Image: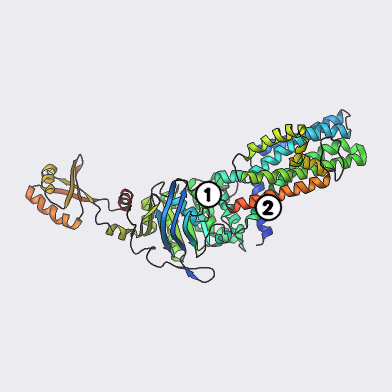
Amino acid sequence: MNSIAIFAEIVRITLRQLLGRRRTLLLVLLSALPVVLALAFRLGGETEIERFTRRIFDTITMTILLPLVAILFGSGAFGAEIDDGTVVYLLAKPIPRWLVIAAKASGAIAMSIVLTGTSTLLAGFIDLAPAGADGIHAVLAQFLAVVVGSACYVALFLALSLFTRRALVIGIGYMLVWEGALSFILTGIANLSIRQYSLGASKAIYTLPLQEARLTAETAFVLSGVLVVASLAIATWKLMRFELPGGSD
Amino acid sequence: MTDPITTQSAAQVPATATAPNGAVVPAIELRRVARWYGNVVAVNDVSFALGAGVTGLLGPNGAGKTTLLHMLAGFLAPSAGEVLILGRGPHRDPSVYRQIGLVPEREAVYPFLTGLDYVKFNARLQGLRNPEAAARAAIARVGLDDAMDRAIGTYSKGMRQRVKVAGSLVHDPQVLLLDEPFNGMDPRQRIAMMDLLVELAAAGRTILFSSHILEEVEQVGTEILVLVAGRLAASGDFRAIRALMTDRPHNITIHSSDDRRLATTLMADPAIFAVELTATGLSVQTAHLTAFRRLIAGASRTAGVRLFEVIPADESLESVFDYLVRR
């Protein structure tokens, strides 16, 4: 059996772990919110790119849905296994640690993209398809932002979950305080904000009417690439040094 | 703490196995291994070597058994000394897991997988050519055929232990490390698991299992390693260890027609350490069982007392262990 088959096996178990949690059902419901709102807007006749982008994509998808889903999946890809000890069954195997990290991250990123990406595409096409080519490009740009954001959030908080059991709490704090408040006040934070990387990357397809998207597409791709690679490298380093507690006896 | 008691043991006899590269090395070897957490010493200056066979790692809670097993499994680095599995350090070397099967103490197993899926998962991650066949064979060995299609979340504690063991031996490892493997098993399952371990040992595997239940160790392996407060208190054949401990008092319970009078007579003999009158009879401690047998006959005649029962208590592993812990 080659590395691809082992990679697929770990992705599969990661997906089953993430799907099996009750919180995933809540996230599915949350991801339906932009779609429901898009339908309401469409029925109310409000299907203009700028209004949709501000009210649904920016306010709900980028500010709440994407960070929440990706942070939960990223911090949960290993977190529960380390807490309950099942990670031993994965690690007591002759598998390079980078492969374990790559598979875990891929599973969590895929889950995040499926949830937030589907929501973004559906909501976008419901409201912006009538806007013609610009509308379609706007939706694809939003989808790209969600893909980049998923990769960044998952990689960062997966790595963090190997260092602390509070990765989820730290992630929600980051989402609310750093990106939700400080990044609006301090423009210099753009280089240290996953939200900014996501919005910047979307400019490769279409420049969404959002004044706070401060990075160019090139800068956003470079920074997000560095973040993902560095996070996964640090996670691999940490997993190679993973130790079980001595136990009570 | 005095030096560990050793008999014809792992510590003295070159215990070897053949490594994957063909070299003849001890399957498990510890050289002056210590592990501490801050100021707390969990394992202290432990050395031994094991070859094929079943060895029981015995000790009370807190003795350092799990710490030792985690070091052997590569999940803890020793603070000092050297841990070797088939001649290689297991820490930070995932390839060593081709030769190790590990059954951790913690009960959790992926609850959403069926028993068969869990063992197949292990087989696939071991890179086996036919995971399905290997998984079914391993499940058959632990007697879980009937339940293999049920989710592990519905398993009893004993069944979860068995499926963990199946997952650990699916790749036929040379070394099997089991932390409290009999936990939660009913007597029938326990006997079947003990038979399996003995069978694997007979096939040349090296099996080290921890337990704080002495009868488990007594029934599976005659070789024991006794950890007390992080140190190796004894290693080797447990019966030989017991025989070596001549300074240990033997407890004997006597029922007679007049326990008080017999006690007075026995007290006068230097072979007797202590005499105690209890509600159930006369409790006597002596260092020399053979001498006591001669003594008791004469003493009863001298005292004019009829003996009803003379019961040597505590010749089990439990008593050996108790003695070592207190030593």
Can residue A249 be seen here? Answer: no
Q: Earlier in the sequence, mark 1 or mark 2?
A: 2
Rendered location of residue B68, percent (x, y) = 46, 53
Q: Name the kind of residue labelled 2 in the image.
A: Ala
Q: Above or below — where is B240 with respect to A62?
A: below
Secondary structure at numbered mark 2: helix
Label 1, secondary structure: give it.
loop
Up-down relation of residue B45 to residue A72 (above or below): below
Residue in the foreground of this view, choosing between A116 and B271? B271
What's the mark number on residue A102? 2
Q: Considering depth in this image, is A184 or A127 the residue closer to the camera? A: A184
Name the disc covering residue B259, or none: none
Q: Chain of mark 1?
A: A
Q: Are marks 1 and 2 on the same chain?
A: yes
Report which quarter residue A61 is drawn in: top right
- The x and y percentages for residue B44 are 41, 53
B284, above or below B11, in the image: above
Chain under disc 2: A
Q: Tell me if B141 is positioned left or right of A94 in this view.
A: left
- The residue under the point 68% across, 52% down is A102
Q: Quadrant of residue B202?
A: bottom left
Q: Is residue B293 left or right of residue B105?
A: left
Q: Is residue A3 visible?
A: yes
* Structural distance between the alpha carbons of marks 1 and 2: 22 Å
**Mark 1 sits on what residue?**
A244
Q: Position of residue A202 (x, y in %)?
A: 83, 43
Residue at x 28% of width, y 59% of height? B244
Residue type, numbered disc 1: Leu
